[in-house]
Image (spheres, rainbow, N blue to C red):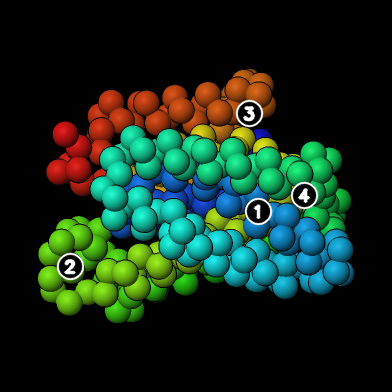
């Protein structure tokens, strides 16, 4: 039982990364129906921005997280203005958009590698201190990751449910054309969605960097787990991405207690995904109308 509790706690810490990054990915998909394969590189960029602020400039963790969220959020807006909006104007199909996002991911990854080098790096945080919480041994990093994730989740929930922006995002997600003729500023909402999605990816990248260290392919290695979480929860549903992220994280860690090797964790996540989709193809919180 103690091992199970420990694995559950570890899964919550890992799932926090999937959840935060997954929300950013699914918000963009919900508004634009764009599957952004460059989202993993957004995480990597956020991690390196935080590394620059903290290791090179000597700034605190809070400043590193804020800088990562700001820079990656602005970068998301730039990609919307320079790439995605022109493609939509030219009526590019879903395949072209998909290939563009894959190409963008490769370009970003190798630019990051060129600028920072392939060397493995760690954020200057305490990776050794451990706290005893009953039968659970919780590292300081895991507690920070979970605490930040909870705070971000509360802010996102309030934004989506209580603000005019959140209502506009939900309206566009439900029916883009109807939202436009109803007076919703679709252009502004799309820009804010990219900024928010990028900011969440930046924060997720910092959390992943704290736990796993930083290297140029860090985000790519996390991307499949993030996609699994988003699809499991229901594509386009922010709350579903949160739920899916924690389910994937917990099941991966619990499976190790059951005897699987750590290298098999990704397979566990996708096994859970397959089982759920067999019974509910639209995902846990997805809408049946979205599935053909």
Q: Nearer the viewer, mark 3 or mark 4?
A: 4
Rendering quarter of residue 70: bottom right
Q: Circle 2: is it few (<14), some (14-19), or many (20+) Cα within 10 Å?
A: some
Residue carrying label 3: 257
Task: Report the residue at 24% width, 63% height from top.
Answer: 172
Kindly identify which residue carries mark 4. 115
Question: In the rendered view, would you say 119 is above or below 256?
Answer: below
Relative to residue 264, is residue 199 depicted above or below? below
Of marks 2 and 4, which one's residue comes earlier in the chain?
Answer: 4
Label 2 – label 1 distance at C-alpha? 33 Å
Label 2 and label 4: CA atoms lie apart by 42 Å
Could you give the CA–CA distance between mark 3 and mark 2, rounded to whole angstroms? 48 Å
For disc 1, the marked residue is: 45
**Callout 3–callout 2 Cβ contact below 8 Å:** no
**Discs 2, 1 touching: Cβ within 8 Å:** no
Secondary structure at badge 3 equals helix
Counting from the top left corner in percent of width and height, residue 58 is at 87, 69
**Which residue was labeled with disc 2?**
179
Where does the image place residue 32, in percent across and percent down from the top left? 31, 54
Dot 4 crowding, Cα within 10 Å, few <14, some 14–19, many 20+: few
Q: Which of disc 2 and disc 3 is earlier in sequence?
A: 2
* Contact check, label 3 and label 1, Cβ < 8 Å: no
Which residue does the image show at 35% across and 50% down from the upper left?
A: 87
Determine the CA span between mark 3 and mark 1.
33 Å
């Amino acid at each position: 039982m103690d091992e199970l509790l420990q694995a559950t706690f570890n899964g919550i810490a890992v799932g926090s990364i999937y959840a935060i990054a997954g929300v950013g990915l699914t918000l963009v998909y919900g508004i634009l129906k764009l599957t952004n394969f460059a989202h993993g590189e957004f995480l990597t960029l956020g991690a390196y921005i935080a590394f620059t602020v903290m290791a090179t400039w000597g700034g605190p963790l809070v400043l590193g997280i804020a800088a990562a969220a700001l820079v990656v959020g602005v970068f998301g807006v730039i990609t919307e203005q320079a790439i995605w909006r022109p493609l939509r104007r030219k009526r590019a199909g879903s395949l072209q958009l998909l290939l563009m996002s894959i190409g963008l991911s490769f370009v970003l990854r190798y630019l990051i590698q060129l600028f920072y080098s392939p060397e493995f790096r760690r954020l200057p945080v305490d990776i050794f201190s451990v706290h005893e919480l009953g039968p659970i041994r919780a590292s300081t990093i895991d507690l920070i990751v979970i605490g930040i994730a909870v705070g971000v989740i509360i802010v996102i929930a309030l934004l989506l449910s209580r603000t005019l922006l959140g209502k506009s995002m939900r309206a566009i997600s439900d029916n883009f054309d109807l939202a436009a003729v109803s007076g919703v500023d679709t252009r502004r909402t799309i820009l804010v969605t990219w900024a928010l999605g990028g900011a969440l990816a930046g924060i997720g990248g910092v959390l992943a960097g704290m736990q796993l260290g930083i290297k140029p392919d860090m985000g790519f290695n996390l991307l499949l787990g993030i996609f699994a979480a988003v699809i499991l929860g229901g594509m386009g549903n922010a709350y579903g991405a949160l739920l899916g992220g924690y389910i994937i994280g917990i099941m991966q860690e619990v499976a190790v207690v059951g005897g699987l090797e750590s290298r098999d964790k990704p397979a566990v996540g996708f096994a859970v995904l397959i089982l759920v989709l067999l019974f509910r193809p639209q995902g846990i919180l997805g809408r049946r109308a979205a599935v053909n």
